[in-house]
Amino acid sequence: RPRRAVELTQLLSSLGPAIIKAGQALSSRSDLLPKEYLVELQKLQDQVPPFPDETAFEIMSSELGNLSAIFRSIGPTPVAAASLGQVYRGQLADGRDVAVKVQRPGCEETIALDLHILRAYSSALTSVISLLGREIDLVNVIDDFGNLIYAEIDYSVEAANARRFRELYGNLPNVSAPAVFESLSTSRVMTMEWVYGCRLTDAADGRAAWPIGPGGVEVPPAALVDTLVQCSLRQILDVGFFHADPHAGNLLVTKEGELTYIDFGMMSTLAPEQRYGIIEAVVHIVNRDFMALAALYQRLGFVPAEVDTAPIASALEAALPDVLNASVSQLNFKSVVDKLGDVMYKYR
């Protein structure tokens, strides 16, 4: 199984942007794939080279107008590139530094083709999986993913997401988000304020703190984790509007010690009943009430209604005690999620 997982990841990484994104999305679906596949798919990164700078500047000009009247300067090459677009650093005529995100040309057509292929294969795979005794509607999964990725390539949607995120969470202690320049943003180009800081991925392993440039403060990792947890709880349990792709590359630490979220293309929402369900699940786990936890999963739709939950409760009881017996300071949340995912994959 590990060898096949490596082969699948290598295959996906050589295909189109939507298929790469689909692999990245599947890397968090422990209810659909076994752990070996999740580990390998988490290594998937956008492996598409930047498109020509001349093309990028043509898109900027067609969307924004005369660039020389807007920008005092703009970098000749991108500072970052991915499957859906690339980012340039610039300075506006008034001296403010900005990040300009430009959509890859032909992106929508390529994604449409990728999704068409994925949907065709998923229909056949759903039938095969059904014969093996597992009821997973891959077509529905691909349709949901298609809605997400089409929202991600519309930069006007991302700009609205960024504004809403900043309004909701920008005033939390040690949390910030860049402002969007609405008059310089369209469906294909988005202009945001430039954030001075370093990515969490830039920190060396084992470093006790992240030093952030001249005059900056050193931020202990524990403080960053606390800020991230507090903000995540506010997003998921309180408001229900959350950043759906908060990996280390999408988080910056500023010289003031703030945790800054970037890249708002993939956001999601939780209805009140879903938020209450998460809280209820935590209560059942802490109380080790595995029958109630299995019933909750069934009520939330993670387990089909016709499935007997008694074996699931027994499997949860067998899987979770090892990770729950640790003290709070030693509790490995990832281990808890992995154990739950293993059980959900078996009984989904």
Image (spheres, rainbow, N blue to C red):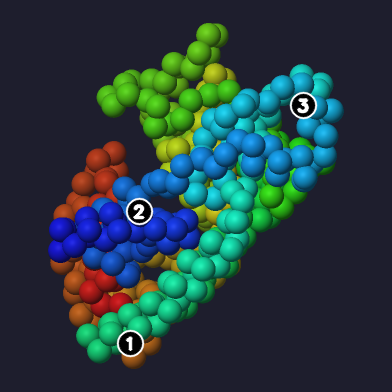
Instruction: Answer few, some or many: residues within 10 Å of disc 2's Cα (few below 14, many 20 plus, some between 14 and 19).
Output: many
Residue at position x 33%, y 80% from top?
A: 125
Q: Which-is-in-front pick, marks 1 and 2?
A: 2
- Residue 277 coordinates in the image, percent (x, y): 46, 67
Instruction: Confirm or deny contact between disc 3 and disc 1 (CB under 8 A).
Output: no
23 left or right, relative to 34? right
Residue at image mark 3: 71
Q: Secondary structure at mark 1?
A: helix
Q: Nearer the viewer, residue 30 or 227?
A: 30
Q: Quadrant of the N terminus?
A: bottom left
At a point 32% along the width and 69% down the height, the residue shown is 31
Image quarter for residue 193? top right
In the displayed structure, 167 sits above or below 91; it is below
Identify the residue position indicated by label 2 in the image.
Answer: 13
What is the crowding at mark 3: few (fewer than 14 residues within 10 Å), some, or many (at least 20)? some
- Three-letter residue code for mark 3: Phe
Q: Is residue 27 visible?
A: no
The location of residue 112, given as percent across then percent down, is: 55, 67
| Mark found first going from the N terminus, 1 or 2 | 2
